Image: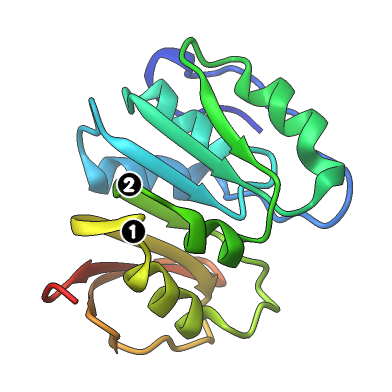
Amino acid sequence: MRITGGSLKGRTVQCPPGEIRPAMDRMRESLFAILGSIEGARFLDLFSGSGVVALEACSRGAVAVTAVERDHGKRRILEANLSLCEQSVEIYTAPVERYLLRAREPFDLIFCDPPFRYRYKNDLLAKIAASKACGIDTEILIHHPRTEALSEEISNLHRSRTQLYGGSQVSFYRRTQEL
């Protein structure tokens, strides 16, 4: 895997052991093109795996990046990969749901890449919406199978866009109102 843009473009990223489905290069490049400039953004990468999406955010100018991965077996490779960033990246080894309960500050962008077999994606989005990690202007992106339809409205979130990538898709959500 390689970083597709920004200051770290072309750098190689290690893949940790165990179950992992890293975000495809083409998909990552497309998503960050859609997002445009993320200079100065606060970025949260949920189900981080190898950390490649967090690295893309660092490479493209995000100033505060947090990676959350529950699998302790992936921590060593995640730390090694994220050490490519000039700035410090916070790493939490915990279930995403637990992290969301403890979050204290909002992020500008939240990227979720749960395992495709994870059945609680709508519930996860509701938990993100209720969390302090989600602010008024937070944009949430969730990667999921193309065959899996997520709700258009979840809690106070509205799906604003869906982007297809082969057998998968990314749904973009924004807040519709304050809780």
Can you say whether 57 is above or below 117 in the image? Answer: above
The residue indicated by pointer 2 is 105
**Quadrant position of residue 98:** bottom right
Q: Relative to 124, is 87 above or below?
A: above
| Quarter of the rendering containing residue 19 | bottom right
Q: Is residue 69 visible?
A: yes
Q: Are marks 1 and 2 in contact (CB under 8 Å)?
A: yes
Side of 81 relative to 171 (left or right): right
Element at badge 1? loop
Q: Amino acid at mark 2?
A: Glu
In this view, 84 is above or below 20: above
Residue 147 coordinates in the image, percent (x, y): 53, 86
Q: Look at 33% across and 28% down and name the residue there.
A: 62
Q: How many marks?
A: 2
Residue 163 visible, this angle: no
On the picture, is 97 further left or further right than 156?
A: right
Q: Position of residue 27 (x, y in %)?
A: 46, 50
Give the mark, 1 or 2, whose residue is nearer the N terminus: 2
